[in-house]
């Protein structure tokens, strides 16, 4: 199955920690990681680095291998169910302290947007409950159904903190009896072949549960400027990376990123240092990937690329790109990578 193509499909956007968890999940199903890694052109070394990020194309190849190994269409939903609060990073514990149910749902969505920026989500009222609808951010081709089911599985686990009965509408079909789906998710109703992909959450009749334990209180009351745990550092790196990717112009600065995260620039610099990265290196890495795709896959003028990537002029862009690649943008455009 061919991977998606485009300027941004080779830009690292997803924490390698998710791929590591996926391999662990597949091993629990009897599929060794070696075969999956060899077929997807990944390595144990890459996935052993918590600060490493993978591209959409890399995930696409990994999921291709997994689907070839296991012919069970419930598999992505079951993997999504493994992505609980801890799997998404300890910062996720904080949101279960909020008493407002709609605020809880909004925080689930906000958190998934940062951790899994493959699809977007929209929250709206639907009758007596709330709806979380998946929205395409990328052209995922035949992988769309697989990835949307991962999201639904994770939403199921997170939303179960607040309610017992959920409903999922999926815009793909299924060859399995509905009973087989409900067997892996008691108290949940499934409807396939719907017009859209969404989760419907009824308003709870009782208080929100704190099943995750005492860590919730600690994380909810801990300010960002405290010394972070490894989970929080990895989460913060992901948030900074997303900020850079969506603000690649001239306003893409450490100060702006810190402001968006409601923390000081000094604290952000310190936290990134603990993760072994810097704002400058992350920004340059993303600029390099975007620039290379623009140069090899589009005819966008160099001065326009320079402006899109936040450089003051074409000459500055050329100097920076030469320092990254050892070749000028013009040379790469003429002769390819």
Image (cartoon, rainbow, N blue to C red):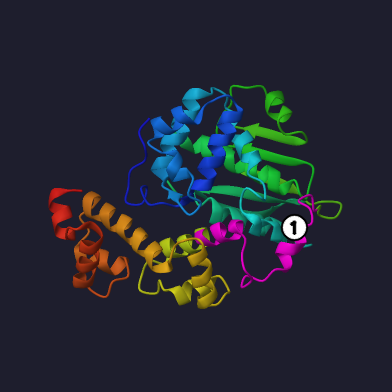
> Can residue 141 be seen at all in this image of the molecule?
no
* 173 is within the stretch colored magenta: no
Q: Residue 305 at what x, y percent from top left? A: 26, 63
* Residue 220 sits above or below residue 77 on the image: below
Tell me: 64 left or right of 215. Answer: left
Circle 1 SS class: helix
The residue beneath circle 1 is 215
Q: Residue 332 at what x, y percent from top left? A: 17, 54
The residue furthest right is 206
Residue pictured at 67% horizontal, 46% vertical: 84
State the residue in front, 224 or 312: 224
* Residue 44 sits above or below residue 28 on the image: below
In the image, the segment drawn in magenta is 210-237
**10 Å crowding of disc 1: few (<14), some (14-19), many (20+):** few
* Residue 163 sits above or below residue 242 on the image: above
* Residue 148 sits above or below residue 312 on the image: above
Residue pictured at 59% horizontal, 53% vertical: 112
Residue pictured at 47% horizontal, 64% vertical: 243
Count the labels in the image. 1
> Can residue 297 be seen at all in this image of the molecule?
yes
Q: Residue 146 at what x, y percent from top left? A: 52, 35
Tell me: 13 left or right of 98. Answer: left
* 230 is within the stretch colored magenta: yes
């Amino acid at each position: 199955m061919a991977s998606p193509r485009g300027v941004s499909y080779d830009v690292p956007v997803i924490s390698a920690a998710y791929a590591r968890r996926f391999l662990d999940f597949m091993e629990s199903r009897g599929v060794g990681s070696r075969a999956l890694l060899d077929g997807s052109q990944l390595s144990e070394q890459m996935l052993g680095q918590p600060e490493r990020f993978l591209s959409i194309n890399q995930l696409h190849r990994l999921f291709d291998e997994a689907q070839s190994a296991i012919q069970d269409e419930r598999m992505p939903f079951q993997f999504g169910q493994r992505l609980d609060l801890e799997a998404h990073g300890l910062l996720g514990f904080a949101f279960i302290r909020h008493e407002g149910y709609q605020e809880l749902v909004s925080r689930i969505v906000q958190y998934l947007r940062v951790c899994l920026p493959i699809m977007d989500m929209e929250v709206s009222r639907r009758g007596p409950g709330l709806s979380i609808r998946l929205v395409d951010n990328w052209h995922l081709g035949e992988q769309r159904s697989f990835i949307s089911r991962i999201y639904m599985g994770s939403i199921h686990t997170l939303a179960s903190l607040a309610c017992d009965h959920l409903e999922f509408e999926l815009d793909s079909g299924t060859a399995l009896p509905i009973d087989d789906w409900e067997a892996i998710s008691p108290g949940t109703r499934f409807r396939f072949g719907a017009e859209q992909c969404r989760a419907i959450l009824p308003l709870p009749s009782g208080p929100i549960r704190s099943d995750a334990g005492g860590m919730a209180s600690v994380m909810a009351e801990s300010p960002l400027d405290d010394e972070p745990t490894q989970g929080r550092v990895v989460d913060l790196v992901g948030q900074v990376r997303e900020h850079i990717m969506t603000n690649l112009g001239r306003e893409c600065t450490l100060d702006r990123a810190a402001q968006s995260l409601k923390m000081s620039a000094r604290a952000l610099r310190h936290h990134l240092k603990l993760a072994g990265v810097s704002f400058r290196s992350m920004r340059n890495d993303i600029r390099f990937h975007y620039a290379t795709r623009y140069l090899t896959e589009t005819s966008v003028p160099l001065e326009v690329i320079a402006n899109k990537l936040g450089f003051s002029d074409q000459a500055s862009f050329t100097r920076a790109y030469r320092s990254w690649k050892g070749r000028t943008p013009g040379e790469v455009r003429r002769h390819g990578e």
